[in-house]
Image: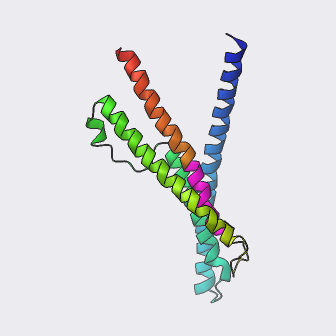
Amino acid sequence: MPIKQQFLEIQIETLRKIDEILEKGLYYISGLLLITIATIVFVAVVMRYVFNEPPLWADEAPRVFFLWMTYLGIAVATKRGKNIRVTHFIDKFRPKPRLVLETFMHSLVLVMLGTLIWYSIPILKLQAGGSMLSTGWSFLWLFTPVTVGSVLMLFYQTRLMIASIQQYQNGNKKEG
């Protein structure tokens, strides 16, 4: 095997390992955020109804954690191909029209994610100087999950589209 081919395979394997670590990290961070949200809400309820002293931060903190958990979780679901899709009709198509339809659907999702990222950047710039009242955290913690999650979903959605095309090409090679 040529050295160039070996180098390329090593790079691909390294990227796969990084991708696996990223997916596990996102998965476990989302789980940790869920546990954190449940704990904070439980403490807030106890503080409010038992001690009649609700913590001021108990409204903002879970909201921020919920947004991060949601967008990181959606990225993991997108990577695994577990996002919401109605495949009942798509599966009835022959391979070539199915590929065209799936590529069109992936393209629409990519356009939507690109638009979301594009329009979220000015919002981040506007919110950069402000801070939440009860926690003192920057508003960026509240608005950044949309951008970060959308970038991750854009990456994973692109991979899903490429995988659909490769699957079609591999299926045609076997038939031909």
Where 159 sits versus 114, above or below? above
Q: Is residue 40 left or right of residue 95?
A: right
Quadrant in the rendering for residue 87: top left
**Image spot of residue 58 (x, y percent):** 63, 77
Residue 94 visible in the current orientation: yes
Q: Which residues are magenta?
A: 141-153
Name the outermost residue toward the bottom: 52
Depth order, front residue of 163/121 = 121
Please indicate whether residue 153 sits to the left or right of residue 17 in the image.
Answer: left
Name the residue located 33 percent from the left edge and 47 percent from the top edge: 86
* Magenta stretch prevailing secondary structure: helix
Q: Place residue 8 in its image quadrant.
A: top right
Q: Is residue 10 above or below residue 41?
A: above
Rendered location of residue 46, percent (x, y): 60, 80
- Expressed as whole percent of the image width and height from the top left, the position of residue 131 reads 71, 76
* Residue 53 image position (x, y, % from top left): 65, 88
